[in-house]
Amino acid sequence: MTKPVIEISNLTLALPGGADRLLAVDNVSFSVNPGEILCVVGESGSGKSMLANAVMGLLPPVIRVTGGSVLFEDRDLLKMGEEDLRALRGQKIGMIFQEPMTALNPLMRVGEQIAEVFESHGLLTPGKRQERAVELLSEVGLPDPSKAVRAYPFQLSGGQRQRVMIAMALALDPKLLIADEPTTALDVTTQAQILQLIRELQKKHGTAVMFITHDFGVVAEIADRVCVMQTGKIVEIGSALDVLSTPAHPYTKSLIAAIPKPRGDGAAATNAAAPILSVRNLTKTYRSGGGWFREERVVPAVDGISFDLARGETLGIVGESGSGKSSLGRCLVRLIKADSGSVQLGDVDMLALSPSELRDQRRRMQMVFQDPYGSLNPRTRVDQIIAEGSVAGGMAKEEALSQSRDLLKLVGLDSSAGSRYPHEFSGGQRQRIGIARALALEPEVIIADESVSALDVSIQAQVLSLLDDLKRKLDLALLFITHDLLVAAQICDRIAVMQHGKIVEIGDVASVFGNPQSDYTRQLLDAIPGMGPDSPLAGNFMTAARQGPEG
Amino acid sequence: MRDFWTRFARNRGAVIGLIILLIVIAISVLAPLLFPQSPWRMVQRPFLPPFENPAFLFGTDTLGRNIAAGLAYGSQVSLIVGLVSTAVALLIGVPLGAVAGYHGGLVDDALMRFTEFFQTIPSFALAIVLVAVFEPSIYSIILAITVVSWVPIARLVRGEVLSLKSREYVEAAVLAGQTNLVIITRQILPNALSPIIVLASLTVASAILLEAALSFMGLGDPNLMSWGYMIGAGRTVIRTAWWLSFFPGIAILLTVLSLNLIGEGLNDALNPRLARTGR
Amino acid sequence: MQFAAFFGSRLLKAVVILLAIIALNFFLIRAAPGDPAAVMAGEAGAADQIFLTQLREQFGLDKPVLTQLWIYMSGVATFDLGFSYRQQMPVSELILDRLPATLLLTGTAFVISLAMGIAGGVLAAMRVGRWSDTLITTAALIFYATPLFWIALMAVLLFSVHFSWLPSFGIETVGTDYTGFARLLDIARHLVLPALTLGLFFMAVYARMTRASMLEVGQMDFVKTAKAKGLKNGVIQRRHVLRNALLPVVTLAGLQAGQMVGGAVLTETVFAWPGIGRLMYESLLQRDYNLLLGIFFVSALLVIVVNMLTDIIYRLVDPRIGAA
């Protein structure tokens, strides 16, 4: 029986007074064996990040350890002095974090930051350190490592920065790697590459990995064992195969059930109806820099986009960051000024309207935004937020407020919510308020711009089903912008895939998933974690999607 | 609102500052009652040291004038100059900054040129030049101080409006059909208030310092007894009569300190997220 | 290539601002109540009719406004800043004569304030919440609120009159004729009080900014990464926190240049330091507007130079600025 690399027993962390619960982590016990990848899965607030920080001794001072032990190499990390812990960090235990943008010192070259790992443990000469840095960069797959070593972080992309982080964490061949949501902030294709890199390096060096994530797809992709956390407690732990295919605890079951699945019912047969929204050759190019001495940078964010949207239909616009999908959404409602093209809403070209005409027509196309914390004015009451549009359009204040209360009920909130302020609500509830606001003007088209991307997966499922219900009830057309193909497949009738400002593929869900025409679509589909043919996730989405609604 | 006061009250420095400021305001309001005679009147023998005669607690100056009376009436000058010039600077700076930040374009370009210009000019030197050219009086002093004070305010407002403009709730308001004016006044400015308020309190503080410096240099309003003037007047006799310059300086120190403390307290109270304990 | 472009555009901006200042000067003279010639001549010169006529001719005061502006501007371009009747010397000569003393004073004060301010801020940040932090923060708060000229006076009172440790007047001891090192020492002794008092206010400013910046940077992700690599705390503070924390301080130092010139005026007045600040005070007393405006122009020029230097330093220190 091999000894575990790290053994956590009864770990308990207390939160400071005034927090929403007493304990961040409550009597948690598990271990990680040599050469294995253990995924710690939970939603936000589950305590999984605190756990990782506690192991390394990186907790913020307000969080106290009130019990338990963390045994590593026969020593309790929680009882070790700072100097001993320091010797372990980077050398025996490595850690990588979530935000590649901010995790590297912006003023130091990347090679120097890698060399620091050797320096802090008194290893190698300065010359040798640089050499090793170049070798490490090559090992993590950075192109042109000898040049990359002299780069500053801002010159690298998010995926490249994560590779640097991995190089730093694995430089001294640690026994344990703690990865705290390292791919959450990355595009799905980059995520796939980084996951693969971690798996390769882990196999090569025999490192044990504690991988923190909220995404069950990632778990299905790389985990050997899984540990599920809810409000600080472990609710289920076991091999990945067991937990994913036959989950025991109701919370695990609900999380897995919340993973987007294609709908069973037939696609809305609305192709016959005339389109309510017709976009032709929409173009928007960003020009930056330029001036006497600098070259201009030209970025075609929206490059000749054309599509139709029928009443009662949901069309998904799927793309990674930089694809132009957000710019597209904003061009449609004229929050951004498009360069050319037409947007026919019914019989009116929205782009050709004068400002005064626009004011009347604007209500017909409304938007639900991404950030639950930034989309509601923190100083305005909820019912007033919802009523603002109607009041601006001339409705009497009392009538508008009463309409607000009705809308709140419609989106599943109590009408008393109207007299409260946004900060009193959770993220999911705020998105519901945002939906109510969009509905207040009785639009014909709603554009949902990454409206569920900032929500936990279980809340996401609820909001998605709300949107779906409302669409049917009110006979709306819904344009659903997202980076998540699975989410799009769950709620959309048709999907359009965007890359570099162009639509590279468009069709109904079954065709796009089952028979992708474009290389890029294939790339995107392959990159979705945990959806391969041998994935332990039951009712595999991909096979179901490929078979189509009849299957 | 109650939240705000509890947070403010928790900051001891801010509370002390508030108390001191209230005392200063009280003195300036009650000055005519406490010292019915003009502070320019000669009431005792010159160079009476402080703390010897309870009727003249802070002593008398070169011409036998009551220093305590000078301090009391001086507080009026400092407070009025500080408050009025800040108010005018706000009246100019806030709308200009808001328009520049929201609409961009010509107004924004012009404003940026202005701020660069004023950033380059040493503000005290400019104030001196303005007061000298327009003859020293309380009006020219207020004018000079306003001229050098409005620019940081406009810049701050511009920055805040620019960043708030791209918030999603502003975009939602645009989509809902609200007019630009309503958006600026109801969506943006209320959320930009906190840094503006903090800057306003700091501006009053620096206005008071500026007025004192101008009066010290002899550019004060010749009809008004101000603290800066008292310090300047006591300069030549400082070796023998230190109290002439000492007490007015303490008065300035306490008033400005109280405003700075209040400013910091406001900052902490209005931005609880930024408070120390790791959140 | 990038750098040359940046420098060129900054230079152009600087020239434009200077022209604007000259224009401002010009219009201020005309805004003052009374006859512009009398204004320019000053109280003393206004009595002298010959001087007044000379001025009128020299500045073309009977010609249209734009021509006058052109004459004035070309004058400034050739460093002709006018004539001071009171002092009976060209303004530019007067200023040049006194400029080195001001540069010495402000330069020293700048270095002192920056060095001690940053040191104080770093110390306070590293010992947050403890008594040394409270001490430094409170001291900074008090110095920030104290009028500069008053501190100067109190310093004179304390160190010069009461304790007789340091001189309080001028740049060299009157009546002596030191040379070489002895002279340097004498000047240094005279420099101590003025430089310290001028630096005190700004010390407070830099200390506060440095402390706040270090605390903010300390919360950033890359500091956590540095810890996770096993770096010692001292190295982390120096290499990761301080370097990043100093960036806003550099910007602030540039912005404070203008304030420091103003402070120099007050300090030189109190300590009778023979620089252009004191010259400005004298010109005020004498209502010598030519001199006053000339000094104003030169001080603005100084600030522009310092601003450009700070910009360049910032670009050198932060690799993100100016990159493609």
Image: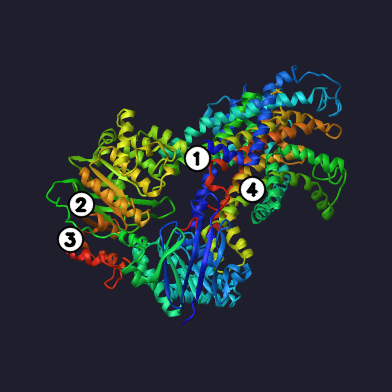
Give the alpha-carbon distance from disc 2 to disc 4, as whole Å.
57 Å
- According to the picture, the residue beneath numbered tag 3 turns out to be A549
Disc assigned to residue A307: 2
Q: Taking the image as drawn, is residue A21 in sight?
A: yes
Give the alpha-carbon distance from disc 1 to disc 2, as whole Å.
45 Å
- According to the picture, the residue beneath numbered tag 4 turns out to be C208
Secondary structure state at the residue bearing disc 3 = loop
Tag 3 subunit: A
Give the alpha-carbon distance from disc 4 to disc 3, as whole Å.
65 Å
Badge 2 vs badge 4, beta-carbon distance below 8 Å: no
Q: Amino acid at mark 1?
A: Arg
Give the alpha-carbon distance from disc 4 to disc 1, as whole Å.
29 Å
Q: Amino acid at mark 4?
A: Arg
Closer to viewer: mark 4 or mark 1: 4
Do discs 2 and 4 share a chain? no
- According to the picture, the residue beneath numbered tag 1 turns out to be B113
**Residue most extreme to the left:** A272
Secondary structure state at the residue bearing disc 4 = helix
**Residue most extreme to the bottom:** A1
Do discs 3 and 1 share a chain? no
Do discs 4 and 3 share a chain? no
Do discs 1 and 2 share a chain? no
